[in-house]
Amino acid sequence: QVQLVESGGGLVQAGGSLRLSCAASGSGFRIDFMGWYRQQPGKQRELVAIISSGGSENYADSVKGRFAISRDNAKNTVVLQMNSLKPEDTAVYYCNAVFWLGRTYNAWGQGTQVTVSS
């Protein structure tokens, strides 16, 4: 199985930046996609950004031009660089990995709080 550990959340003023990191541990797996989702109180979890093993990126419209996702396949890590943060970006951010270990599995991190003050 794959375990995901996130770091980098916190409190920042509007217009500021934060960098979220996620590391996958385990053995014998191949990670196809890594991504970040977020969940605001009373709302469903939503996709923020996702990146394939080949480097193809997709972003939610609300973060395009402000957030950037990157990954290191050799280290099984993914980073979300968040710039020009807005109060509406406040949420719990979750790392996600879609990986192959005999079949396709879905793994989630524990979540990290991002709070943007106005």
Image: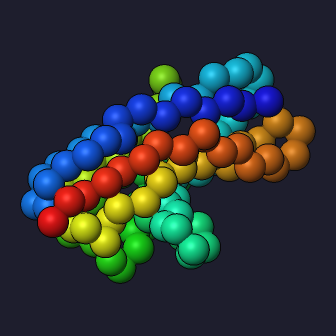
Query: Which residue shows up at 32% across the image and 65% down it?
Result: 89
Query: Which residue shows up at 82% across the image and 36% down it?
Result: 101
**Percent from the top left, x then y, of residue 116?**
25, 58
Query: Which residue shows up at 81% across the image and 49% down it?
Result: 104
Residue 108, above or below 39:
above
Farthest right residue?
A: 102
**Percent from the top left, x then y, of residue 108?**
66, 45
Farthest left residue?
A: 15
From the viewer's perspective, tell me whether residue 115 is left or right of residue 53. Answer: left
Instruction: Give the total of numbered labels.
Output: 0
Query: Which residue shows up at 72% across the image and 31% down it?
Result: 2
Residue 42 shows in the view: yes
**Percent from the top left, x then y, of residue 114?**
36, 51
From the viewer's perspective, tell me whether residue 39 is left or right of residue 105. Answer: left
From the viewer's perspective, tell me whether residue 104 is left or right of residue 8. Answer: right
Q: Nearer the viewer, residue 1 or 15?
A: 15
Q: Quadrant of the C terminus?
A: bottom left
Q: Nearer the viewer, residue 55 or 76?
A: 76
Residue 34 shows in the view: no
Farthest bottom residue?
A: 61
Q: Nearer the viewer, residue 102 or 88?
A: 88
Question: In which quarter of the view is residue 109 placed?
Answer: top right
Residue 46, above or below 70:
below
Q: Quadrant of the N terminus?
A: top right
From the viewer's perspective, tell me whether residue 93 is left or right of residue 8. Answer: right
Residue 40, above or below 106:
below
